[in-house]
Amino acid sequence: MPVPEVGTPRERDVFTQGRGLMSTVVRRFLLILKNPLLPVARAVSLWIALTYDREKLHRLLGTMYCKPARGKFGSLVFGAVLARWFRTVYLREKDPDVREALKDVCMAGPGGVGWAEHYDRMPIVRSRRFDEEFPFFPTVDSVLENAADGAVVIHIGCSSGRETAYFAQRYPKLSFIGTDIDGPIVSRAERVYQRDNLLYKVARARDILLVTDDVQKLFILSHGSLQYVQPEHLEMMFKSLRNCPDATIIVCEPWREDGPSVGRHSRWRGNFSFSHDYRLYSEQAGLETMSFRTVQTVHDPNSRLFKNRLYILVSKVPGL
Ligand SMILES: C[S@@+](CC[C@H](N)C(=O)[O-])C[C@H]1O[C@@H](n2cnc3c(N)ncnc32)[C@H](O)[C@@H]1O
């Protein structure tokens, strides 16, 4: 099938977000007119991000998903410090392993478990039909319906385990492995969502094939998790799939066409999230695209989320 292009990667400067110098200066000037204390707040946050005791800084960043643990001073400066830290430390880091470890400072531990609890509370359907709201589910169904008995399904970044358990129950003849980067998140999933054909393992997306010896018939799922994987690690992951005789990957991730480029096929989406062009990573690794589309998730053009689309890709190791 013909595969449409998704946007055109534009090389942009991470720090000006692709705006020209003049428009950046004018924008900043207007912001200062609106809020004269802005330069002071910026200077303080820059000072904290660069010179604050590293341990204290990391403790503050570790409250990203636990507001109550921040204290009064922490609450006051957190937003500005985080924004500075992203620009001056995180996005400037060249080594993807170090960047990944920096991400863990904010996302792992109690914060990650807090998110898993949040996903558990999220209603399955909000305003629209289930398959419209969560196209991941019908896409996975369309692939797993034809899977041979005994095939292994690995869920990357399973968080609460709710989705993994849903599919494990729906396809009792397949073996499921729910994985996540973080031990406490995996322990919680093991406790809360148990199924006979489901086990959980701690694993990073980069090393996903290490979770099983049985790679004969493999399905790999990701729903909102590969967005957090470093571009260099995503490349490694797709390349590693080429070692499997029969592997299919189903990806459903947020996607925005704007944002500063990071690497060849990724853009920074904000915080720890990237808009990766999964089809390009997959094809670069020699996988074959089975289906691909992007869908608009929110219809309201005034919504802050309007620019977000969902990127849905099914690709497989060719020749089978
Ligand atoms: C948005 S959540 C997934 C939510 C899940 N689809 C659900 O609705 O329950 C993303 C998960 O990816 C995990 N994650 C982040 N970086 C990862 C990495 N490099 N490898 C594997 N998992 C990762 C996080 O710990 C988090 O639990």
Image: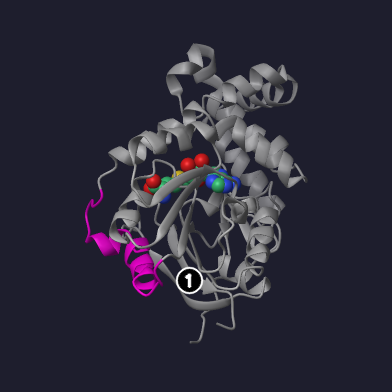
Q: Residues within 10 Å of mark 1 (few under 14, many from 20)?
A: many
In the rendered view, would you say 127 is above or below 2? above
Residue 105 point in image, percent of width and height: 61, 30
Residue 24 point in image, percent of width and height: 65, 47
Residue 104 point in image, percent of width and height: 60, 34
* Total count of labels: 1
Residue 165 point in image, percent of width and height: 34, 49
Which residue is at the far bottom? 1
Q: Nearer the viewer, residue 188 or 261?
A: 188
Please give left or right for residue 23 compared with residue 3 in the image. Answer: right
Please give left or right for residue 134 compared with residue 182 in the image. Answer: left
Residue beneath the point at 48% across and 69% down: 313
- Specify the amino acid type for callout 1: Val
Residue 131 highlighted magenta (yes or no)? yes
Residue beneath the point at 67% across and 72% down: 284
- Which residue was labeled with disc 1? 314
Residue beneath the point at 75% across and 42% down: 93
Q: Quadrant of the C terminus?
A: bottom right
Report if residue 270 is visible in the image. no
Please give left or right for residue 176 compared with residue 91 in the image. Answer: left
Residue beneath the point at 55% across and 57% down: 275
Residue 79 highlighted magenta (yes or no)? no
In the rendered view, would you say 232 is above or below 281? above
Q: Which residues are magenta?
A: 124-149
